[in-house]
Amino acid sequence: MTRFEQLNSQVIKAHRIGETSLLVDIYDMLGAEELEKGAITSGCFLLTQAYVYALESGDLRASRIHKILQSHGREE
Amino acid sequence: MSNLSSVVQPLNFAKGLPNEHYIDDQTFIEERESVLYANWSAVAFAKDVPKVGDANPITFLEMPLLMIRDNDEQVRVYQNTCRHRGMILISEKSNIRGTIRCPYHSWCYGLDGRLRSTPHVGGPGQNTHIDIKRDELNLIEIRCHVFMDVVFVNISGDAETFEEVHSDLLDRWKEFDKPFYHNPDSSFELLVNSNWKLAVENYCESYHLPWVHPGLNLVSRLEDHYHLEKHLKYSGQGSLVYSQLKGENNQVFPDFDGVSDKWDTASEYISLYPNVLLGVHRDHTYAIILDPLTINKTRERIAIYYATEQATELSYSDLRIKNTNFWKEVFKEDIFVVEGMQKGRHGKFFDGGKFSPVMDGPTHLFHEWVATQINIGRKERVTK
């Protein structure tokens, strides 16, 4: 199983069982990787996913992710 | 449109509300707007959201509401509908740790109702748009007020404040303005096949007690009761012979702190218009919320409260259950009456009924109040 397949299966499972902390982990990590590659849109897409689940669950990472999205003009 | 002119006459000459108010769907909708949405209606108990972040979806006359306990530990009520596509936000009782996330497109709202995020609203990864003004898209907050742990809402948003409307009762029962304590074993529900108003009307008066609650005839006779009548506010009955329930070894519930001697043997039962029935005693109170499911179906939600935390603990469990069962039996004894009056309203020659000039004053007051609210609504519609 490739890394992508592994992460994809983890994401699907985490969505199914509502494990928001893991969703934040994965989307946050993948978003950061995309931004590092210069892929701003897909990076911000993934970070938005992470941000929403962090907001929903009161995860303290929301504030950091929010700042990144703001710096790219993607959040208020 | 029903004719209400005879309903607002003085008691001796008045008739009750016409049949339409119990069996006609159009009139039910008119009452929903003019009586229940325009005033302070009871929709829930605050005990059902004990912790910060607790969220409890409620449906009141098909309107989806969301009761939450916010970060300041205050109860708030919102319309349970996302400002984006009108999706129901919360479907089950839950605890919100962060924000309320709409399950459809994940717009997120804080416990204060503020719209916090609109993911991808401007395209993938773009969460803003010049025409999405978040401060104009917060959750719609519904005015609410908590009294005796009952959560009241004013859906129209333009009633006078709860304190203004009910200042008389707040003053009358100020001795009970204290913390209440509840154990879940002291809540129950009854489903009644009748219009909600019939439960109010029956609760107001003591006239029926000798016949419907014969168990009271020797311990709390009809002449031991008095009317409680506040024009256009509330009505009910009081008793002068309340005696505390006793358990093993003469165990009784602790009293509310500092209540006056009057309450040693007194108890009072008030229909607070429109849809909540309250009872107070030296050692416990209760509230019955009448939830009008349809024109001829009402859910009665009952919660009994005690004066001290101790009374909600295990050592009082037997006495509590005895008390709950006592009230449950009393309230069940009323069911055949309200269901019978509902059926009776299909008698096409029934003219609203003739009140006893002596015994039916509290019930007439409620009818007059309902008619007054409907007349106000009709006048407003004409003006608009």
Image (tube, coloured by chain):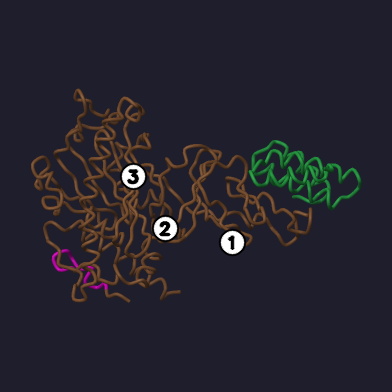
**Residue under mark 3: which chain is it in?**
B
Q: Which chain is green?
A: A
Q: Amino acid at mark 2?
A: Ala
Please tell me whether residue B64 is drawn above or below residue B378 in the rendered image.
Answer: above
Label 1 sits on a secondary structure element that is: loop
Q: Earlier in the sequence, mark 3 or mark 2?
A: 2
Colour used to depict chain B in the structure image: brown
Q: Amino acid at mark 3?
A: Phe
| Farthest top residue in view | B249
Which residues, given as a range, are shown in magenta? B4-14
Q: Is residue B207 left or right of residue A60?
A: left
Q: Amino acid at mark 1?
A: Gly
Question: Residue A40: image x %, image y %?
Answer: 86, 50
Question: Residue B359: image x %, image y %?
Answer: 13, 56
How many angstroms separate mark 3 from mark 1 (CA)? 32 Å
- Residue B156, by quadrant, is bottom left
Residue B149 on the magenta segment: no
Depth check: B332 or B353 in front? B332
Q: Earlier in the sequence, mark 3 or mark 1?
A: 1
Q: Quick check: do tags 1 and 2 share a chain? A: yes
- Residue B188 tag number: 3
- Residue B86 tag number: 1
- Residue B159 tag number: 2
Identify which residue is drawn at 27% across, 28% down: B254
- Residue B285, by quadrant, is top left
